[in-house]
Image (spheres, rainbow, N blue to C red):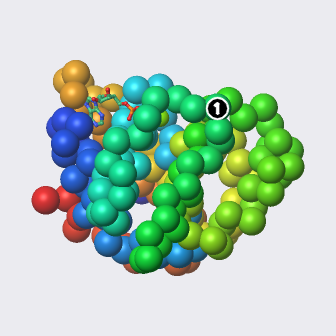
Amino acid sequence: MQEILCCDELSTKKYARNLAQILKKGDVIVLSGELGAGKTKFVEGILAYFGMQEKISSPTFTIVNEYHNEQIDIYHFDLYRLGDIYEFENIGGEEYFNKGICLFEWGELIEDILPNDYIKITFEKGEKEEERKLQIETFGTKYENIDFSNYKE
Ligand SMILES: Nc1ncnc2c1ncn2[C@@H]1O[C@H](COP(=O)(O)OP(=O)(O)O)[C@@H](O)[C@H]1O
Ligand SMILES: [Mg+2]
């Protein structure tokens, strides 16, 4: 478990943008934490690195938003409204794991069927209004040697 402290929204987005340089097709990140914790801002930082849309529109009724360019395909899931894991399976959710980079807000809801290797980032509000603590855990072996503090400026 590694902890990264982001003092404001910009710092969270910059951290995500820096970390995005290691991401490739087949990578899976679970983003966990209460509403307003910063999960979507983190996704915006990743999209920014790949030169994609930098503002994600407010809640949609779709479970997945897709972003594509010549370099990469990104699948951004928000599972907040997911009823249960079967609903995810029924939309063919597991087929996305290898298709590009998968980012799952509320991904803990599907932990039982995630691939062996994934990164889990838990966002917690800090002592100050704009502070967020990112607790980073890795599952499987693929990410075990990454020093996540390298991507903090
Ligand atoms: N350090 C920070 N990192 C990310 N967002 C922050 C931070 N400090 C304040 N905020 C604010 O908190 C909110 C986070 O919203 P959002 O990313 O949509 O959360 P979530 O997707 O976890 O529900 C935004 O209004 C953002 O401006
Ligand atoms: Mg969100």
Would residue 5 appear left or right of 61 to someone viewing this image?
Answer: left
In this view, the residue farthest toward the left is 153
* Image quadrant in which the N terminus is located: bottom left
**Secondary structure beneath disc 1?**
loop
> 3 or 56: nearer the eye?
56
Determine whether, in the image, residue 21 is placed left or right of residue 103. left
The percent coordinates of residue 139 (x first, y second) are: 57, 65
Residue at image point 22% right, 28% down? 130
Residue at image mark 1: 61
Disc 1 packing (10 Å; few <14; some 14–19; many ≥20): few
Where residue 118 sits: x, y (%)? 56, 64
Is 12 or 74 nearer to us in this picture?
A: 74
The residue closer to the viewer here, 125 or 98, is: 98
Say which quadrant the C terminus sits in: bottom left
| Residue occupying image coordinates x 44% and y 76% | 70
Q: Residue at x 53, y 29 (%)?
A: 59
